[in-house]
Every structure is written in structure tokens, then in C-alpha cells.
Amino acid sequence: MPNVVFVVPFTMESSLRFVRAAAQLAGVRVALVSQDPVDRLSPEVQQCLRGFVQVKDGLDPDLLTDTVRQLGRQLGSVDALLGVLEPLQEPLATVRERLRIQGMDRQTAANFRDKARMKTVLAEHGLPCARFRLCAAAADALAFGRECGYPLVAKPPAGAGAKTTARLERESDLEAFLRSVPPQPGSELLLEEFVQGREFSFDSISLAGRHVFHNISAYHPTPLQVLENPWIQWTVVLPRDVSGPDYRDIFRVGPQALTALGMWTGMTHMEWFRRGDGSIVIGEVAARPPGAQFMTLMSYAHDTDMYRAWAQLSIHGSFAPPQRSYAAGCAYLRGQGEGTVKNVTGLAEVQQKVGPVIVEARLPRPGQSKASSYEGEGYVIVRHQDTRVVEAALQLIVQTLRVELG
């Protein structure tokens, strides 16, 4: 009977869904570690737990080591230590090594978490990635800008996706950025070439070193554009057919990148670009399941429960690759301005025109606070066997629905 400790620093529904999936596997006992108190959990989640410990810092490897050791004494053993947040991956790897729990080690976790180290590994293996430099001084950054040209993308080495990035159009932008975030040894700045082109994700599952499942998602527009323009309601499309020449390059390069970074068993989320000249570039790779409803989208596209599949992989080391039967997509609803949600307009028109293909929705509620995430205040998911139907439905949704804040 496997004993699983799940670390969820903040009891967000997006993380707890993975906890429930693990607890629903036959014979699995789950304990939870969180910064939030147990009464923040729903009765359903509380009932499925065999242990709970509240900690001051859910990312502190020393504190986590003591807590997991304590739960191990309570449960009899700890067979798996899991967590889905990107900043957790290195602390969890540290605890696994200290307590001899099977799973990703520190070196591999660092390959994925440290973006400069990641790109160094990819470049050493001849894999396509953006030009970059890790800068410990302003002079290094300015020199790279003159060598590479503008625009550039600035980010901390351990950033998580687009949330921590900034686009710099010219040298004066870089100078201003350096004044606000001066780099120094131990607190370096990662600068990258700004890659222009279509952006996609390559989500994959590896099992004992074999890459056994791959998903393609297309962003409209790119996440960085979404971050820079809070008014944009964006979409993600999972095409039904990913076997054609459009994705041949990433199906070859993506698994090579994962092997180079040391992925053995687990799920990864890779962002990649196709330039105007047709070449591809790997952006970043995270050693975790994707966020922003991607797991739900993959579940609809493959007509299966990907949360449960991930739990089965992570705990029992088994995975049965599903068939892709549908195209699926998500429209992310974002209010303009500040304040709370006052109203959502366009619902009747959307329901009339594309209601039959809508399979899930979380609509913004009056009084709801403005979201802190670029995912927005709500979403609508659609599914159909024809990718063009999904694309058209998503465009109608983002052009019709309006979230009024005030």
C-alpha cells in the first residue's frame, strides 16, 4: 500500500485536484503538507487524507525534510513525495535524496529549474534554443544587448514561465531595468534573444527514460504578449491531428531535450517557438504538469482523466498512452481595468452560437476580485472533432464575452 506525501504550499484548487486524483487510486494513502491550515480544505479533501501537517514555509527543504520524516513515522514509510508547483521541484528533490525516496534528484531538478543552466545543457547537446547570457554585472548585460540586438527578454534564472519576464525594446529599456534590478554575483540576470514567431507547448510524459506521450498546444497570442497586455483575452488550442509535418521537428527535438536534461519518469511542460523561416526554438522546460487548465484540456482531447494518469505514473510508475480523439481549446476571460467583477456580457450570444461545443466553463462572478494571474477571472473550454470548429468557437468567445470591472 503506497504512502504518498503531497506538498501543497497554498491550497489552490489547481493543486488540490492532483491530490484528489492520487487519493482516489486504489490502495494509496495520502498525507498533505501545506502552509495553509487544514480548515482551508474542503471536507472531501480532508476525508481522503491520512495525515496533515501545517508548516511555516512549504518551500524550505530543511523544514520539509523534518516534516516528511515525521509523516513517515506516522504512516510507516513514504514511498512517493509529490508536488506540482515549479518552485517546489528543487526542494522536493533535496528531501528525496536526504530521505532516500525514489524520484527526481537535485541535479535533474536544477537542470529544469535554473533556466541559464537549462539552456547551457541544451546548447551543449546542439539543441535549438535562444541566444542567452547570465549576467552578474550591468556591463555584461549591456555588452550582450549590443552583441545580440534588441528586443531582449529579461528574467531571473529561476523564473516560472512568462510571469517573471520583461521585454526590452532598446538599450535605454535595459538600462532602466538594470537600475531597478541590478545584477550581482549570486543574484544574476538572465538575458535572452527575443524569439519572434508562433508559440506552442510540448507537454510530455516519460517513463523509465522512454518518452511515451506528447501533447501539442498552440497559444494565441503568445504568453508574453498576454502578460504585457492585460486587456487581451487569449486562447489555447489543442489540434486533433498532431501527426503532420507542422510538428515533426518538435517530436524529434523535444524528447532529445528531455533526455539531455535528465528526465527519467515524470511529466514536463515545454514552451517552443516556430520562427517565420520555419525553424524551431526551445523556450523553457518545466519538470511538472502544465498549469492554466492544460491538464483538463488534455483530458478532453484524449477522452480520459489526465490527473489520474499523472497520479498513476507518479505513484505506481505505469502509464497507458491514450488516443487523441478530439480537438479542444480554452478561452481565458480577463476583465479590463481595476476593481471587482461587475458584470459579464455576451453570454446569451455565445450560448446560442457555440453552446453545443462548450464542455466546461468557470464564469466570472459579480463581486469577484480581479485575478492576479494572467489566466484571468474565468475560462470557457470547448471540444469538437474538427480543429477548425474549436478555433472558430474560441475566437467568437473572446470577441463576444466581456468582463466588466469597477
Image (tube, rainbow, N blue to C red):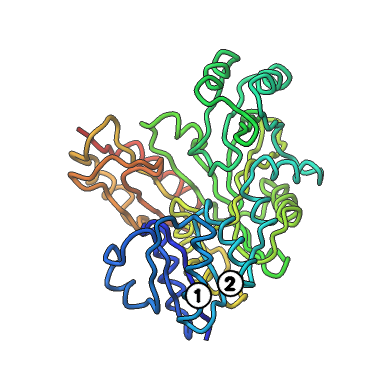
- Residue ID for mark 2: 313
Q: Amino acid at mark 2?
A: Leu
Give the vertical position of 54 relative to 235 (above or below).
Answer: below
Query: Who's the residue at 72% across and 36% down the image?
Result: 279
Residue sitting at x 70%, y 56%: 107
Q: Secondary structure at mark 2?
A: helix
> Does residue 55 appear to the left or right of 86 in the view shown?
left
Mark 2 surroundings: few (<14), some (14-19) or many (≥20) residues within 10 A = some
Quote the CA–CA distance across marks 2 and 1: 13 Å
Residue 146: x, y in percent?
70, 16
Nearer to me, 113 or 271? 113
Q: In which quadrant of the rendered view does residue 262 lie?
A: bottom right
- Residues 59 and 265: in front is 59
The residue that mark 1 highlights is 4
Q: Residue at x 48, y 46 (%)?
A: 236
Q: Nearer the viewer, residue 44 or 388?
A: 44
| Quarter occupied by the C terminus | top left
- Give me the residue at 44% from left, 60% from top: 296
The furthest residue to the top: 172
Q: CB atoms at circles 2 and 1 under 8 Å apart?
A: no
**339 left or right of 183 in image:** left
